[in-house]
Amino acid sequence: MEEQIKNQLLFERNGNGKHPQPLLPIINTPLPIPDPTDEWDLRQLLALIRRRALVLGSVAIALSASVGFWTFTRQPKYEGGFQLLVEPVTAESQLEGLTQIPGVSTQMQKEGLDYDTQIQVLRSPELMAPIIKEIATRYPDVNYTSLLADLSINRFQETKILDIRYQDSDPQKIQYILQQLTAGFLKYSLQERQTNLRQGIQFVDEQMPQLQERVNTLQKQLQQFRQEYNFIDPEVKAEQLSQQVSTIKLQRLETQKALAETRALYTALQGKAGAQLAETVILNPNLQDQSEASQALNASSVYQNLVTQLREIDSQIAAESTRFQEDSPILLTLRQKRENLLPVLRQEAQRVLSNTLVEVSNQISGLEVRAAKIAQAEDNLNQQIQQLPTLARQYTDLQRELKVATESLNRFLEKRESLQIETAQKEIPWQTIAAPQLTQEEPISPNIKRNLILGTIAGLLAGMGAALLAERLDNVFHSPDDLKEIIKLPLLGTIPFRKSIPPATPAAEIEVVKKSEGIQLLLDSFSNSQGESYFPFLEAFRSLHTNINFLGSDTPIHSLVISSASHADGKSTTAVHLAQAAAAMGQRVLLVDADLRLPQVHNKLNLPNEAGLSNVITTSLPVDDAIQRSPLWENLYVLTSGPIPPDPVKLLSSKKMQQIMAQLRQSFDLVIYDTPPMLGLADSSLLAPYTAGIVLVVRMGKTDRSLLAQALDRLKMSPATILGTVCNGVKNYDFAPYNYYYYKPQV
């Protein structure tokens, strides 16, 4: 029996029970956390504005009103100004040619030294004191702090012009203060210029001896460097060292070759090879050998005389051998003379070879001394080559320092002459190129038009920011697209929002109304008190049923679980109307109220609940006796929950419950289980693995995203299949297509 139940749980069967159907694959899709940086399209933005219109409008109106109130309550201010054409006046600027940094333009040095410093000087208390004293005779309330608060001095773009501006609520006061500032600045420029020229000449005279001494010192250092290292130019020195290295290498190779040859000869003469060579030459005096030993023997006159005598005796023996027999006295005498001559010849050869060995040894000693001297010379050259980069750098540094010092000295000489000529010429102070006057007749502050526009824009932006913040803090779903984008699960159906759901109406009654009094009667019959049409609501569940069938197009779905993440998401309503839609489409449907904690199916269908699922599990009541037929729908059957048990989990996880589920699948085309919410309860997870899967109901504007994420995480740990989601309570549902097809009058 248990084996049979397992097989039934592993395979769904169609109505005839002939073709086994494997369960759908488990969909374990994590719920992603929305990223605040995600881009929003225009449709999402419009939906957000519609939802958060109150927040957006409140913040925008409040901020715009605050900006407007601040603008209209401010005292108007006017502005006036004048411009001065200035010349460099500080001592540093007069000596700019002396302090110029190589590679940096004079204009850049002026920007860093002249104008910023000069502006601070013009704003200083010492310079402003006489000007403020003159202004105070007419306007006693003006002091240093109040004057600088409304005074601005800036350089005009990249020119030599200073732009001075002053703001106040009294135009006459502005005009007077600007006149005093103009007179004070021009007086300062004339006095300062004379002082700076004299200071410039004095500075040059003070620096000249030091520069001259610096140039002389560097010239002496460069001269000593050349004398010490015989160093004129780095390139010439490098070429000389390269040629010397090549010559030394060639000499070293030749010496090594000669030394190797001489050592080989010495070894040959000193060993057995030398003795054998001497014996060979003695035994064969006529042998022509080009070796060093043969050449030494040939050079000895005594040895050659003995060889000549030996050859003469050999000739006589040869001649007499033709005339006499071998034992003749003459031949014996000649052979005896030859035998006596050979030891003498051998002794002479040994003496000559010994002398040759001594000479070869002396040659080796000489070659070794020469090789050592060449190696020492090569080491010296290598040291010079290694030292060359350092010497070249020192030489270059000395030359560069000497060049810089010489150029500085020349600039000081030229500048001294220039300052002397400039002192003798007519002095030109600063010039006013724009007289003191108001910049415009209208006040510059507040700018009512600009402030109102900016306030409106800032209000809209702040309102939008507040709306976005409220949207991010709101952790519920608002639209089907929002649900699909975040949880990445199939959206099986979209149920429109209704303020009240009317009692179930059988399909037969709808057909009667259709055939009775026409369009107006049909609209009146299927609309609630708020004027909401009931047809889109019904059609949404028909679409849901169709989409569920599409999931099992190859292997039909015969059972499923309806649940939700939390309470009041509309799971029971969805289960009831889905069962009605399936029954209306001709299927034999059983709706099982498996919510043994807070059952709702019997209330929605107006059915008694004295005996139900809990009785079937705990008693011997046959399941067929507990099933009730809906009085409104021909093919709809209901198994209510029955009395609430003390431990629902124990009943739903029992083997008897599994047997009941297998039996129901065999008896009905579609079995729908309405189960409790998943959060904190295991009921749905216990039943879902023994069906084709689970459908999660998500209510717009209520279901918390984090709670749905927890529910999906629970399903990951179970073998249950997630068929998809149902988006319940969708507001602003467009049912124009339904009205067109259902209510279009017949022509």
Image (spheres, rainbow, N blue to C red):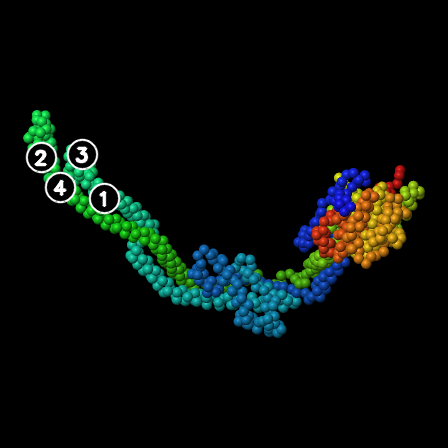
Q: Of 32 and 114, which appears nearest the observer?
A: 32
Q: Amino acid at mark 1?
A: Thr
Label 2 vs label 4: CA separation?
Answer: 18 Å
The label shown at residue 288 is 3
Can residue 135 be seen by looking at this rendering? no
Horizontal and vertical percent for residue 269?
Answer: 20, 42
Q: Which residue is mark 4?
A: 347
* Nearest-to-viewer mark from 3 and 2: 2
Residue for point 11% across, 40% down: 344
Residue for point 80% across, 57% down: 647
Q: Residue furthest left?
A: 329
The label shown at residue 336 is 2
Label 4 vs label 3: CA separation?
Answer: 20 Å
Horizontal and vertical percent for residue 310?
Answer: 11, 34
Q: Earlier in the sequence, mark 1 or mark 4?
A: 1
Placement of 129 over or under 475, stated as above or below: below
* Nearest-to-viewer mark from 4 and 3: 4
Horizontal and vertical percent for residue 529?
Answer: 89, 52
Label 1 vs label 3: CA separation?
Answer: 22 Å
Label 2 vs label 1: CA separation?
Answer: 36 Å
> How many residues crowd around disc 2 within 10 Å: few (fewer than 14), some, or many (20 or more)?
few
> How many residues crowd around disc 4 within 10 Å: few (fewer than 14), some, or many (20 or more)?
few
Q: Which residue is mark 1?
A: 267
Can residue 503 be seen by looking at this rendering? yes
Residue for point 31% across, 60% down: 220
